[in-house]
Amino acid sequence: MKRQLKNPVFIISASIVFILVILGAFNPSGFGSVATTLFQFTTVNFGWFYLLSVFGFVIFLVALALSKYGKIKIGPPDSEPEYPFFTWIGMLFSAGFGAGLVFWGVAEPMSHFFTTPFSELNAQTEEAARVAMGYAFFHWGVNQWSVFAIVGLLIAYLQFRKNKNGLVSTALEPVLGKKKTVKHTIDSLAVIATVMGVATSLGLGILQMNGGLKAVFDVPNSIWVQLMITGVLLGLYLISSSTGLNKGIKWLSNINLGLCLLLLTFVFIAGPTVFILNSFTLGIGDYISNFVGYSLRLTPYEGGSWLREWTIFYWAWVIAWSPFVGAFVARVSRGRSIRQFIFGVLVVPPAIACFWIATFGGTALNSDLNQGTEIAKAVNNDVTVALFETYQHLPMTEILSLLSILLIATFLITSADSATYILASMTTNGSLTPALPIKIIWGVLMAAIAGVLLVAGGLNALQTASLVSALPFTVVIILFVYAFTKMIRKESVTQSSEH
């Protein structure tokens, strides 16, 4: 235990996060304005870098899956998958989406419907609704999951095929060598990126829970309510994390999946079912036909901040999330071939996400287009009420709202619980059983940074935190691709010489 607390990566990363918490707590306005300046700087100057990198990851993964290397097992050559297919997908779904999809499932298509992605497109028209749905599918689709897949694949390959620890620095040894200072720097960077990514999701979920409580119980939408929610969630996920991976997280993942399916089925049947199916099918078509254009779209000739606030923010957020989701995806993917892993991760969770957006976002779009409701306007005024505003036009409004608040809470607890485990593991040399006090320290720091960001500027500050920490980590993932290519070629050479 004492040795784990003296780990340099733990000391460096925990100290940096702690300093940020103190600075934010004592000078929230200064913290917020620095965050805004950094947000502008990274998105204006490096948006192209995020877009090219993520598009490159997709091409690399598809080429790898279709190549001869696709047959290689993540684990010993005779290993079988540790979890059945549906359990595996359930775990991927819980880790990768967290509360994000529940937050943006209605909020995103309605935001694009109200303020369109293209300046020449008229808002709140049938064409705007179609583009809104296609763009929401794009943001939650293959590009997002390619980032998780690369990090997860390399960590899983090292852990289960090469019997090494699952640290980010170990994955980069073929490129950067084994110098301790380099390794500690890389691992600290991964930890800070993860804390910021998870804090962003926690903050978004807390904002949405406050929106839900206002809709159902008329609780005021205020920073004090949000900080109280943060405190309650902290207590709950610390209790969960003390029970270990196979009890707390597994149990909560099952509740998440059950609640998700229940809400999805109800809204699908009670909402405009045929419209949902039609918009889902058309949205997939638009997604496929616009894939390359959207992946590389910037607006150097007309300016505007839409892409910075949406696509570039999303890619940065998933890159910040990727050490955590990647490590978690790796942990549950032992025994699958590289091809199964890539297609499983790149196809199934995005398909579920698109159907979720078509069901919830489609219900809201149909309501505004055909029944004259003003959900888009309400979302434009307060993005956190999107889901609850949609429920106003469905039967059993209050029950749906309460179940959704419960779902957001269980999603946040699962994500935070998994993250405390992964962060503790990353800061104790990749230990699969990190000490409870280290998990508690990370749990408290994550809640504290989420609270500070909420006080410093709500949604904008949350978005900035993930963007800034993601920039250096994008370079790390590009190095991952190079390191993995070197390792896999070596493996192929040794296999062919054995034959």
Image (cartoon, rainbow, N blue to C red):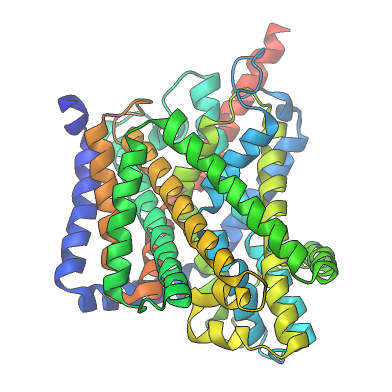
Of residues 47 and 198, the one drawn nearer to the viewer in this rendering: 198
8 left or right of 411 in image: left
Task: Decide which of 179, 125 is in the foreground and name it.
Answer: 125
Figure check: 225 above or below 183: below
Which quadrant holds the C terminus? top right
> What residue is rendered at 39% in x and 43% in y?
417
Q: Where does the N terminus fall, quadrant-wise?
A: top left
x%, y% of residue 62? 72, 43
Q: Position of residue 61 (x, y in %)?
A: 67, 43
- Please give the name of the residue rendered at 71% of the width and 57% of the height, measured from the top-left corner: 265
Please tell me in which quadrant of the rendered image residue 310 appears.
Answer: bottom right
The residue lying toward the viewer, choosing from 206 and 403, is 403
Say which residue appears at 26% left-offset and 32% top-offset: 436
Q: Residue furthest top?
A: 498
**Above/below status of 89 relative to 113:** above
Q: Position of residue 227 (x, y in %)?
A: 28, 66
Disc count in the image? 0
Above or below residue 473? Residue 359 is below
Left or right: where 58 falls relative to 23: right
Occupied quadrant, residue 11: top left
